[in-house]
Structures are given as C-alpha cells and as structure tokens.
C-alpha cells in the first residue's frame, strides 16, 4: 500500500475542478490488492462515487462498477476512507464536493499510482538451481561405516540426481567413488532421504535436473565443505541400538548362509 502526500500547491491555481478526484488532493492511498487478485493474476478495474466533506474528508463511498465484480470493492473503500483534501471554497466559504467519480485499475503493467496498482512480480528463488544445497529442506547427517572407521579408510562418493517440482530426490546414480564401491550404498541411502523446498522461476515450480553432490568419509580434503549433510568424520559411526536391531530383523528375517529357506510344504 502506497500513501502519497500531494503538494499544497496542487490545484491552487487555475479553474476549480470539484469533480476531478485528484484536484486539491492532499493524501491518497492506493488500494491493497486482495490475495485472490495476486494469486490468480487478475486484471481489471473498479469505479466509485464519493463525497468530500467541508473539512476535506472522504465519505459516502459507493461502488458503481467493477470487473471482476466485487473483487476490489472492499479494498477500494478502505483506501478511499484514508484520502483527504485541501479545503474547497465557493464564494469565499468552504464547501463540500458531491459525487466525485474515480476509477481504479489493476493489472500486469504500469507504475504504481493513486489510481493504478500493478501486480507484484512473480517470485523466483534466489540462487543457482544446480547448487545441491540451495532450497535444501532436510538432510540426513552422513555417518561413517564402522568397519571403515576401525580400519581408517577414507573415501569420497560423487552422486548425480534430479529434483522433482515438488522437491523429491529422484534418479540417483553413482558418478564416481573412491575406494570404488565401498561407500556407494551408504551414500545412496543418505541422499534418498534428502528433501527440498520447491524452486520457483517467476512463480512456477520447476524440476532441477543433473545435480551433483560430493560425500566425504573419514579424512576431509583441503577446501572441501565440512557440513554434516555431506561429510562423515571418523567418530560419526552408526551405532545401532538393540531395539533398532530387533525392528530391522522383524522387517527382514535373518536366514543363515548355507541354510535353505523353508519350502512351505513343497518338495
């Protein structure tokens, strides 16, 4: 909402124009666009009549026409109630002004004025869409595998993936890994749990394809980021509690190697 203080000299010279809504105006406030107008990117106009009291205050506001119908009526009335005017004199006496007409417009183009309200620019997410940490909503802290921690084996895995419009991680693939294959499953499981906020380009959510992220285990190379989303230090081993172990085995019953699975009555 914009409030404009009109200069005192406005309308001081020249013929009186009591039916001009901007003549002798001292303060004007443009209407605030309702949420539905912004959300649906509506354009249109609304016209009204109003009176100006002897003291320069606005009263008796009546909407005479609007398109889309009714959308801006309340906003216009609230704005006009805050307008005020310098005194208007007739024959040496301050006089009211009746049935002053005004039309407000709103839409995509134009500058903000007392009688025109442009739609705000569509939002765009700030940042490089190829940056794996832009709009990151949730990540699972990377953990160091216990065996490799004991043996002091460091590693790095580079993963490629896509992000859907809704922020879901998809199409994960291992691009490279050192030592090869040692940390691959660990890295894939961690990345699969990542979640993102939507990335918007002029108001529209877009998919982000071809992203890359590096995961580090153990020793961290110089210059590599040390955030726990992409780095597992030696001490960050995944210690499984007895309850977690039991729950995992309930999901995947353990069968010893070399022992055939039950035949369920089949020969």
Image (cartoon, rainbow, N blue to C red):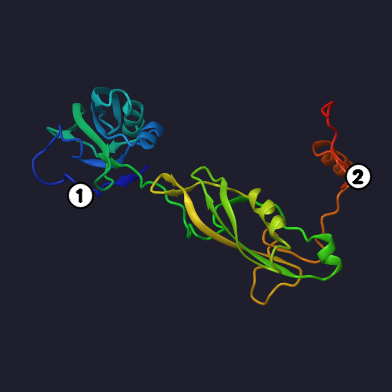
Q: Position of residue 262 (x, y in %)?
A: 85, 33
Q: Which quadrant holds the N terminus?
A: top left
| SS for dot 1 | loop
Query: Which residue occupies 82% across, 71% down?
Result: 152
Residue 225 left/right relative to 254? left
* Outermost left residue: 15
Q: Position of residue 200 (x, y in %)?
A: 45, 48
Given residues 45 and 25, the one toward you in this image is 45
Given residues 246 and 56, the one toward you in this image is 246
Residue 180 left/right relative to 51? right
Any mark on residue 242, and which? 2
Q: CA distance from mark 1 to mark 2?
A: 83 Å
Vertical placement of residue 117 versus 264, above or below: below
Image depth: mark 1 or mark 2 in front: 2
Given residues 86 and 254, the one toward you in this image is 254
Any mark on residue 28, and which? none
Mark 1 lies on residue: 9
| SS for dot 2 | helix
Q: Are marks 1 and 2 in contact (CB under 8 Å)?
A: no
Query: Which residue occupies 59% across, 53% down?
Result: 172
Q: Which quadrant holds the C terminus?
A: top right
Q: Label 2 crowding class (10 Å Cα cut-off): few <14, some 14-19, many 20+?
A: few
Residue 21 in which image quadrant: top left
Query: Which residue occupies 71% across, 72% down?
Result: 220
Q: Position of residue 237 (x, y in %)?
A: 82, 59
Residue 229 in which image quadrant: bottom right
Residue 166 left/right relative to 23? right
Residue 186 in which image quadrant: bottom right
Vertical placement of residue 14 versus 214, above or below: above
């Amino acid at each position: 909402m914009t409030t404009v203080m009109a200069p005192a000299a406005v309308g001081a010279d020249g013929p009186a124009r009591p039916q001009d809504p901007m003549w002798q105006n001292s303060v004007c406030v443009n209407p605030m666009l309702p949420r539905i107008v912004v959300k649906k990117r509506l354009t249109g106009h609304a016209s009204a009549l109003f009176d100006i009291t002897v003291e320069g205050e606005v009263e008796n506001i009546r909407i005479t026409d609007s398109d889309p119908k009714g959308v801006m009526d309340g906003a216009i009335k609230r704005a006009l109630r805050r307008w005020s005017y310098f005194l208007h004199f007739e024959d040496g006496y301050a006089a009211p002004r009746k049935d002053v007409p005004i039309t407000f417009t709103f839409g995509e183009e134009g500058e903000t004025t007392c009688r025109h309200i442009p739609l705000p620019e569509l939002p765009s997410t700030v940042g490089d869409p190829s940056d794996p940490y832009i709009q990151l909503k949730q990540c699972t802290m990377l953990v160091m595998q216990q065996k490799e921690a004991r043996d002091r084996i460091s590693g790095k895995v580079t993963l490629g993936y896509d992000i859907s419009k809704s922020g879901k991680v998809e199409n994960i693939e291992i691009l490279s890994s050192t030592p090869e294959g040692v940390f691959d499953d660990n890295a894939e499981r961690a990345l699969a749990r990542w979640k993102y906020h939507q990335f918007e380009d002029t108001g529209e959510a877009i998919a982000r394809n071809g992203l890359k992220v590096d995961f580090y285990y153990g020793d961290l190379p110089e210059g590599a980021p040390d955030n726990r989303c992409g780095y597992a230090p030696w001490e960050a081993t995944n210690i499984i509690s007895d309850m977690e172990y039991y729950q995992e085995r309930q999901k995947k019953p353990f069968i010893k190697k070399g022992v055939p699975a039950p035949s369920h009555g089949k020969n």
